[in-house]
Amino acid sequence: MKILDIQSLNMNPYVKISKEWMLVTAGDETKHNTMTASWGAMGVIWNKNTATCYIRPQRYTFEFMEKGDTYSLCFFDESYRDALTLCGRTSGRDTDKDQAAGLTCAFYEGVPYYKEASLVLICRKLYSQFLTRDGFVDPAVYEKNYPADDLHKMYIGEIVAAFENE
Ligand SMILES: Cc1cc2nc3c(=O)[nH]c(=O)nc-3n(C[C@H](O)[C@H](O)[C@H](O)COP(=O)(O)O)c2cc1C
């Protein structure tokens, strides 16, 4: 594992998150769950380096995000596309995704992440809040994305560690 200085991260979040996708993994050494996400953000707020993800409440991962204060965002090489597709199409409620996807869970100070990831961001929740219907300035965006009114919860996490697996 090679710990990275966040200032020297050389990546395009629009490609990394939206096109390559990421795994959001939460829980602890007793039980964890992971899911694929392609919506998110990286930036700065409150003078902290942050990563933001958006989780719908029906995800099993949501329960783990709510229970704990830490989680990881893992990014992978293209060779893991099938694994990420599986983690985005099945639920940990009825599938052992680590086994099905061939991923190896490890822990960084108790936070679950995957050994196969090329880049790992360990995050500590700073702020979480459900998006609200009345916040949408353009109602078409709400209607297109929330026909079931299952608005995402937003999690802004401080990036407390970033590393590459070697
Ligand atoms: C490419 C891709 C991107 C996704 N992005 C998100 C996302 O940003 N937020 C979200 O709530 N679900 C997203 N999903 C859906 C979850 O990954 C999916 O519902 C998953 O099965 C949830 O697993 P869980 O029930 O074990 O948590 C995405 C799925 C795919 C395939």
Image: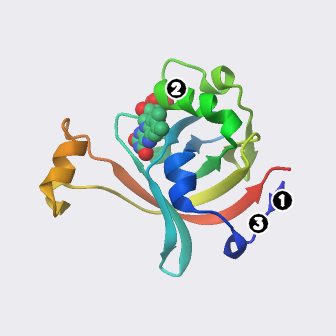
Q: Quadrant of ligand 1?
A: top left
Q: CA distance from mark 3 to mark 1?
A: 6 Å
Q: Please, what secondary structure does the residue beneath circle 2 have? A: loop
Q: Please, what secondary structure does the residue beneath circle 1 have? A: strand
Disc ID at residue 92: 2
Distance from mark 1 CB to nearest ligand 1 atom below 8 Å: no
Kindly identify the amino acid type of the residue bearing the numbered disc 2.
Gly
Report x, y in % for residue 85: 54, 30
Quarter of the image for residue 9 reads bottom right
Nearer mark to the viewer, of 1 and 2:
1
Kindly identify the amino acid type of the residue bearing the numbered disc 3.
Leu
Distance from mark 3 CB to nearest ligand 1 atom below 8 Å: no
Q: Which residue is painted at 19% across and 62% down in the image?
A: 135
Q: CA distance from mark 3 to mark 2?
A: 30 Å
Label 1, on which residue?
Answer: 2
Label 3, on which residue?
Answer: 4
CB within 8 Å, label 3 to label 1 = yes
Q: Residues within 10 Å of mark 3 (few under 14, many from 20)?
A: some
